[in-house]
């Protein structure tokens, strides 16, 4: 049994007609955990979603669900040229729908602005203790509105630290 959240929009009822839904809890089970030189291939873990993981990646990447054309049509956007910014507008409204839907279902989710602030607060605490925080910029900067989040205009050392999870090879 997997809890799924039906995706609806607070102002666009037509979006619900697409029948979109997403599982409530992200569970990762295809990575190996390396500790002390040993690999543990069966080390599943979970957390909670940041809205853009679903609304700006999973639902819209062309090699995943590629839903931006359907969302734009549902919103009745002018798709005659890129200069109408129809994909951008559809992307924002889909992310509004994801956050709205999870909150309406009582399922924990966070937005990319809040998580950017949380990451910088964590970074500041670690730096006050004389520790550096390695990070992959492409994972820290969200795929929606990245330039207006406080994590965008910073650089991070992308250092491999262990213990850590790695993709299976």
Image (spheres, rainbow, N blue to C red):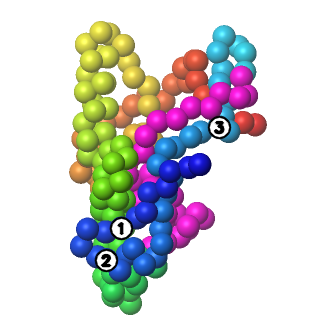
Could you say where residue 130 lies in the image, as x and y percent from the top left? Answer: 32, 10
Q: Which residue is mark 2?
A: 13
Q: Earlier in the sequence, mark 2 or mark 1?
A: 1
Going from the N terminus, do you reach mark 1 or mark 3 first? Answer: 1
Q: Residue at 36% of width from left, 67% of height from top?
A: 8
The residue closer to the viewer here, 109 or 164, is 109
Q: Residue furthest right?
A: 169
Q: Is residue 109 left or right of residue 117?
A: right
Q: Which residue is mark 1?
A: 8
Question: What residue appears at the point 33 percent right and 64 percent down from the top-left corner?
Answer: 97
- Measure the alpha-carbon separation of dots 2 and 1: 7 Å
Q: Which residues are magenta?
A: 40-68
- Using the image, determine if residue 4 lies above or below residue 109: below
The disc placed on residue 29 is 3
Q: Are marks 2 and 1 in contact (CB under 8 Å)?
A: yes
Residue 40 x, y percent position in the rendering: 71, 23
Q: Could you classify mark 1 by the number of other residues whose Cα lies within 10 Å: few (under 14), some (14-19), or many (20 or more)?
A: many
């Amino acid at each position: 049994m997997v809890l799924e959240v039906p995706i609806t929009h607070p102002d666009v009822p037509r979006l619900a007609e697409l029948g979109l839904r997403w599982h409530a809890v992200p569970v990762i089970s295809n990575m190996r955990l390396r500790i002390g030189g040993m690999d543990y291939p069966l080390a599943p873990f979970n957390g909670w979603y940041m809205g853009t993981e679903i609304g700006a990646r999973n639902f819209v990447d062309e090699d995943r669900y590629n839903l931006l054309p359907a969302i734009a049509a549902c919103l009745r956007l002018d798709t005659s040229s890129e200069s109408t910014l129809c994909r951008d507008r559809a992307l924002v409204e889909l992310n509004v729908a994801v956050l709205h839907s999870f909150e309406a279902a009582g399922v924990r989710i966070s937005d990319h602005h809040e998580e950017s602030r949380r990451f910088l607060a964590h970074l500041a605490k670690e730096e006050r203790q004389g520790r550096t925080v390695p990070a992959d910029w492409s994972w820290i900067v969200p795929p929606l509105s990245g330039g207006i989040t406080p994590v965008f205009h910073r650089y991070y050392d992308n250092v491999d630290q262990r213990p850590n999870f790695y993709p299976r090879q």
